[in-house]
């Protein structure tokens, strides 16, 4: 459960509901508009270090360029959106995406990082991801 502040055009004002979870959701017409999870982590060799996070218990390195982000509180469904950046010290561009053959779940999301030109899996030195959902 969550504490919710909802600015609704039908309610003509701001409605606040609460429970004991300590989670705050900002909504507009019943749709959550704030991040439901985010994480910043770095990688050195095979060691993952989470620098800061919200609603993320851990990040696991599955293999080169392959990571699983584990959520503290399960998402209400697996239809969330992930966005973010990754940084590297090499000269080629890299990108990330949800792993093609592993569907996101309510408790975790597996991601790949890869070179833009060859699609080869590579590790980044720093990641910053944010998750949006209901």
Image (cartoon, grey):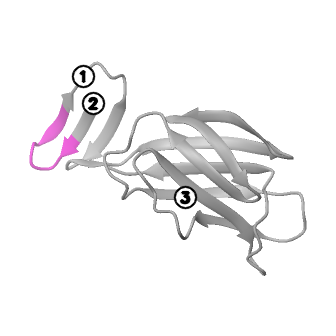
> Does 88 sit left or right of 11 as displayed?
right
User: What residue is pinned by disc 2?
Assistant: 1
For label 3, the SS is: strand
Instruction: Tell me the CA gap for discs 2 and 1.
Output: 6 Å
For label 1, the SS is: loop
Label 2 Cα crowd, 10 Å radius (few <14 / some 14-19 / many 20+): few
Is residue 71 covered in magenta? Answer: no
Q: Earlier in the sequence, mark 3 or mark 2?
A: 2
Q: Are marks 1 and 3 in contact (CB under 8 Å)?
A: no
Which mark, residue 19? Answer: 1
Residue under the point 48% across and 42% down: 37
Q: Are marks 2 and 1 in contact (CB under 8 Å)?
A: yes
Residue under the point 70% across and 48% down: 61
Instruction: Tell me the CA gap for discs 3 and 2.
Output: 24 Å
Q: Quadrant of the image for the N terminus? A: top left
Label 1 Cα crowd, 10 Å radius (few <14 / some 14-19 / many 20+): few
Horizontal and vertical percent for residue 99? 57, 65
Instruction: Tell me the CA gap for discs 1 and 3.
Output: 29 Å
Which mark, residue 83? Answer: 3
Horizontal and vertical percent for residue 39? 60, 42
Front-most of residues 114 and 66: 66
Residue extending farthest top: 20
Horizontal and vertical percent for residue 126? 76, 49
Q: Earlier in the sequence, mark 2 or mark 1?
A: 2
Label 3 Cα crowd, 10 Å radius (few <14 / some 14-19 / many 20+): few
């Amino acid at each position: 459960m969550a504490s919710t502040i909802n600015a609704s055009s039908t309610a003509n004002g701001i409605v606040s509901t609460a429970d004991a979870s300590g989670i705050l959701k900002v909504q507009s017409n019943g749709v959550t508009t704030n991040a439901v999870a985010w994480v910043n982590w770095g990688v050195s060799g095979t060691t993952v270090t989470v620098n800061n996070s919200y609603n993320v218990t851990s990040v696991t390195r599955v293999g080169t360029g392959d990571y699983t982000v584990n959520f503290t509180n399960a998402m209400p469904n697996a239809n969330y959106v992930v966005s973010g950046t990754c940084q590297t010290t090499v000269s080629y561009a890299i990108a990330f995406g949800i792993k093609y053959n592993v569907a996101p779940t309510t408790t975790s999301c597996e991601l790949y990082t890869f070179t833009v030109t060859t699609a080869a899996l590579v590790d980044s030195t720093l990641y910053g991801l944010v998750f949006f959902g209901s």
